[in-house]
Amino acid sequence: MSKESGLKAERAAEEFLKARGYAILDRNFRTRFGEIDLVARDGDMVVFVEVRFRSRDDFGSAQETVGREKQHRIVRTAQAYAQSRGLDAALRFDVVAVSPRGCEHFPDAFDALEAL
């Protein structure tokens, strides 16, 4: 996937979430552990969103590409984000799958404790 395709997918996911009442707090937060595409607020919950783009499902769906190793990196990065911002909120990890058909949202896509 090209950088341009990735940016388009992230923008589509951001607009999708905003239309559902999420407030976007940050984009492309990076640490030495990895990157989180979007950080959002859903009520009292801080949501770390992994955006996945797939033009086809021949080799599995977008959400299936977020394996245990990727989950582990996202959780470590989220912990660094929460610590750096002094967050005292419940955390959740979502996946937004973007395809030519649109966006599909998978709230609480993986268990943070299992990913550690």
Image: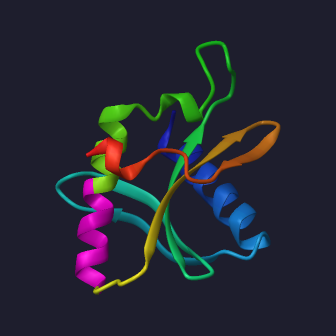
Please name whichever residue, 6 or 75, is drawn nearer the observer in this view of the structure.
Answer: 75
Q: Which residues are magenta?
A: 76-85
Q: Give left or right: position of 111 versus 23.
A: left
| Residue 44 to residue 66: above or below | below
| Residue 91 to residue 72: above or below | below
Query: Residue at 27% of width from left, 51% of height from top?
Result: 34
Residue 78 among those drawn in magenta: yes
Image position, residue 23 (x, y; %): 62, 79
Pick out the residue farthest to the front.
113
Image position, residue 75 (x, y; %): 32, 54
Q: Tell me the colour scheme of the image.
A: rainbow
Image position, residue 35 (x, y; %): 34, 55
Q: Main secondary structure of the magenta part?
A: helix
Query: Residue at 62% of width from left, 53% of height from top?
Result: 107
**Which quadrant of the structure image shows residue 10?**
bottom right
Pick out the residue farthest to the left.
32
Query: Residue at 35% of width from left, 39% of height from top?
Result: 70
Please name whichever residue, 49 or 93, is drawn nearer the observer in this view of the structure.
Answer: 93
Image position, residue 68 (x, y; %): 35, 33
Query: Residue at 31% of width from left, 75% of height from top?
Result: 82
Residue 43 among those drawn in magenta: no
| Residue 22 to residue 76: above or below | below
